Structure formats: structure tokens, C-alpha cells
Image (cartoon, rainbow, N blue to C red):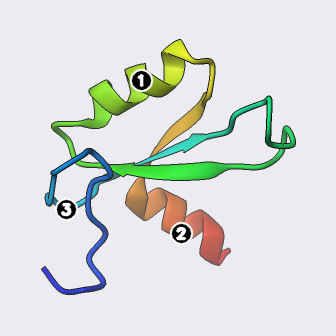
Amino acid sequence: MSDETPICSAKGCRAEAVWVLAWNNPKIHTPERRKTWLACEEHREHLSQFLGVRGFLKDVVLLKEWESAREA
């Protein structure tokens, strides 16, 4: 891994990120605003559940697809 390798957002995890969890907090963000967390395979479900229970999770996308969409 290099300094530019995206890593998982789970506390203490240093694994390479594979997923992007797009979310927003409707109490403080406009509806179109998307914040992101990155997740490895192991933590994708846990982080998704954390955001989902709060009503924050908007989308879960493979990192490579997220990056391709942003470049287009």
C-alpha cells in the first residue's frame, strides 16, 4: 500500500477500501449533499448498518465505480 491507497474508515482498520458508503445527515446537510466513508470487505456491512439505522445511508458503491463516475 502507498500513502495514496484508500483505507477503510472503520476504527483501527488499515485494510484497503473496496466500497464507498455515501451518506448524509438530513438534519444538517442539504438533500443532494453526500459525505463518504470507505469500507473494506470485512467492515462494509457493519458500517452500512451503523449509517442505515440512523437513516443516513444513501448508497453503497464499489470504490472503482465511484471513482469512474466522478471522472466522467
For the C terminus, give its image quadrant: bottom right
Secondary element under disc 3, as helix, strand or loop, is loop
Residue 43: quarter of image: top left
Secondary element under disc 2, as helix, strand or loop, is helix
Determine whether 47 is above or below 4 in the image: above
Tag 1: amino acid: Phe
* Residue beneath disc 1: 50
How far apart marks 2 and 3 lie (CA) works out to 18 Å
Marks 3/1 in contact by CB < 8 Å: the verdict is no
Determine whether 26 is above or below 10 in the image: above
Q: Mark 3 or mark 1: which comes first in sequence?
A: 3
Tag 2: amino acid: Ser
Identify the residue at image location x=83%, y=45%.
32
* Residue beneath disc 3: 16
Q: Mark 1 or mark 2: which comes first in sequence?
A: 1
Mark 3 closeness class: few <14, some 14–19, many ≥20 residues within 10 Å: some
Identify the residue at image location x=40%, y=58%.
63
For the N terminus, give its image quadrant: bottom left
How far apart marks 1 and 2 lie (CA) works out to 26 Å
Q: Which mark is residue 68?
A: 2
Mark 2 closeness class: few <14, some 14–19, many ≥20 residues within 10 Å: few
Q: Mark 2 or mark 3: which comes first in sequence?
A: 3
Identify the residue at image location x=62%, y=77%.
71
Secondary element under disc 1, as helix, strand or loop, is helix
Identify the residue at image location x=63%, y=69%.
70
Indicate left or right for 21 with 30 as reference. Answer: left
Tag 3: amino acid: Glu
Q: Position of residue 15 (x, y in %)?
A: 14, 58
Label tally: 3
Q: Position of residue 65 (x, y in %)?
A: 48, 58
